[in-house]
Amino acid sequence: MSIFYINVGIKHFTDPNWFLQIYPPFLPFGLAAVYISGFFEVLFGVMLLIPKARFYAGWGLIMLLIAVFPANIYLAYTNGAVMNISQGLAYARLPIQGVFIWLAYWHSKDD
């Protein structure tokens, strides 16, 4: 899970347009939000590797996943068109976010 978040977080900086395409256009500060969320993904991904920080990393990821959920809603709203993916895949991302939240919670309980 740590490697996943670190890699995705880095991608926020190397390819921010990939994330901007699902950023709801009615929300302000799109590019800044992409960079900020990427920073926290890297930070919390690294923190997952530190046993004493895992609790905070898990809860930080939960809050981050809730904060970025509007992007998944917007992707579903466009039926995947903004990323040129299928409608089914766009809608499948919604419950998958719940799985990620559960995994973050599970990691927060790890000693």
Image (cartoon, helix red, strand yellow):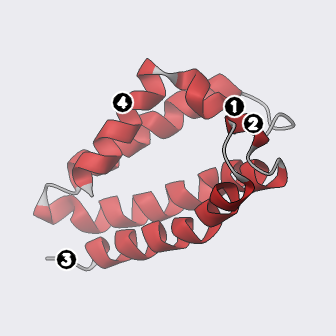
Q: Earlier in the sequence, mark 4 or mark 1?
A: 4
Q: Can you identify the residue that label 1 sits on?
A: 21
Quadrant position of the C terminus in the picture: bottom left
* Pointer 1 local density, CA inside 10 Å: few below 14, some 14–19, many at least 20: some
**Disc 4 versus disc 1: nearer the observer:** 1
Q: Are marks 2 and 1 in contact (CB under 8 Å)?
A: yes
Distance from the alpha carbon under mark 2 to that under mark 1:
6 Å
**Above or below, comparing residue 105 to residue 38 in the picture:** below
Q: CA distance from mark 2 to mark 4?
A: 22 Å
Which residue in the protein does label 2 denote?
Answer: 82
The percent position of residue 37, horizontal first and vertical second, equals 51, 39
84 or 7: which is nearer to us?
A: 84
Residue located 65% across and 29% down the image: 20
Work out whether mark 1 precedes mark 3 in sequence or the reverse, and give the earlier one.
1
Instruction: Name the residue type under label 1.
Output: Gln
Marked residue nearer the N-terminal end (2 or 3): 2
Can you give x and y, in whole percent of width and height, for residue 50 in the image? Answer: 13, 56
Image x and y of residue 35, in percent: 51, 28
Kind of element beneath mark 2 = helix
- 8 with respect to 110 (left or right): right
* Residue type, label 4: Ile
In the picture, the quarter occupied by the N terminus is bottom left
